[in-house]
Amino acid sequence: MCGIALLVHESGVKVTGSDIIESNNTVLLRSKHITVEIGHNHQNITSPDIIVYSSAITITNPELSFAKEQSIKSLKRGIFLAKLSSFFPSTIAVTGSHGKTTVASMLAHILIQNNKSPAYLIGGRVNNIKDYATAGAGDILVAEADESDGTLSHIKCNYGIITNIDNDHFWNYHSIQGLFESFRRFAFSTHVLLTKDSPDSRSMFSDHKNCRFIGEQNLNRVSTLPLLGRHNRINALFAIIMAEQFGIDFKDSVSSMSTFQGVDRRLSLRYKSKKLLIYEDYAHHPNEVKACVDAIRERYPSRNLKLIFQPHRVERISHYCDELAAELGKADELYVIPVFKAWMKNKSSVSAQDIVKKINLIPAFFHDQSLNSLAKRIAKSSKSDDIILIMGAGDITEFVPVLIQEFA
């Protein structure tokens, strides 16, 4: 939502908005002279031409309810993105179950470094790109297309990237088949498609006239890039190969990638001393946990890995409890804190404790006390050469400075 506001504002359209709390995003928007109110109130609606709202907004929201009463056109974020993309001669939409933000960021970085001046709309903060979004020169748009809320099939684009296909968010489609069909509709709306080589993608996209499958056999082409994790090398391949469609030589893209500084909360190194490293990652699905832990093990094979994990949404524990336990259990020591429930409602009786109960081979603890007490507990038990990995998509990011303070 922040990125859309920035891009549309930069294009010369008046933008206002509201959020429930102050944040870095509201500060950023105000710094661009965009009016942002705190608290949702129908009085914030001042005769706009269109309302754009996130999937977190329910029909009972006072602003959305008022807009519908007044017959003000109201669109979900993903549907508005589809309409926005139609104004660009070339749209590159990046979707998939995992890695969208990283691939979109890498591609935007390559295009910027090679003077293509793209517009971009990225769902995370990129360490060496100033803002979430910009309007660019108006020729190329790089955008994430989110599969989670059912709006993916609305976007039509020249170029598409499907990073991978997993069974995350399928509860929004009533079945895994519904989710997969959404990916398929997206794929066949593109003229050029890149996707990860897998049995599912082969069965779904082999009849696409211009589909390229990116697999392990391509990894040697980016072996010199200093990226943490095999998954990030595949991410880089997507960006580099797509950049070729815009006349950028493979070697020039690799050179550009050498200055890419990553995306915030994606294996971000938060603290480093002679004896200790602290990383933070956004992983919350079992396959994301696996990719992250594998990356740390690949880079630091002999070091002790201490993992702090916050589950994201009760829905994921309900569906993936065994899988999460299996992947989290590959650490040397595990701390799980209560679930971040996000915006969905679920009456399931499962909890974060159920993950811990399934882990027997390593020390695993459920911690439901304060973050300060957890930080002290971890600091007290940490040893020389430990790597501490803080993981989750919720507000566990607030734990990072609390823990660092114990070592500073």
Image: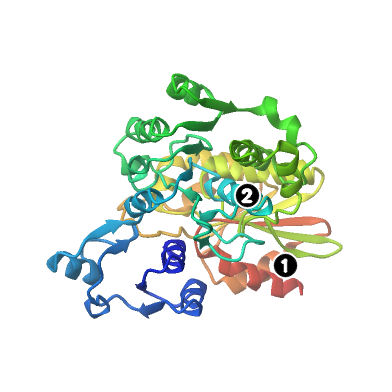
* Circle 2 crowding by C-alpha within 10 Å: few under 14, some 14–19, many from 20: many
Identify residue for label 1. Answer: 379
Vertical position of residue 273 compared to residue 190: above or below: below
Secondary structure of the residue carrying numbered label 2: helix
Residue 47 seen in the current view: yes
Residue, x 34% and y 30% (percent of image)?
177
Q: Please report contact status of discs 1 and 2: CB closer than 8 Å, yes or no.
A: no
Quadrant housing residue 261: bottom right
Residue type at tag 2: Leu
On the question of residue 360 being in view, the answer is no
Q: Is residue 249 above or below residue 37?
A: above
Q: Residue furthest right?
A: 274
Q: Please identify, in this view, whether the residue under mark 1 or under mark 2 is nearer the observer.
A: 2
Position of the C terminus, as image quadrant, is bottom right
Query: With 34 as the anchor, is 363 left or right in this view?
Result: right
Identify the residue at horizontal 61%, vertical 74% (top origin). Answer: 372
Q: Which residue is mark 2?
A: 111
Front position in the image: 99 or 279: 99
Query: In x, y percent, where is residue 66?
Result: 18, 70
Q: Earlier in the sequence, mark 1 or mark 2?
A: 2
Residue 132 position within the rendered picture, expressed as x and y whole percent measured from the top left: 53, 62
Q: Where residue 152 appears, x then y in whole percent? A: 37, 43
Q: Residues within 10 Å of mark 1 (few under 14, many from 20)?
A: some
Q: Amino acid at mark 1?
A: Ala
Secondary structure of residue under mark 1: helix
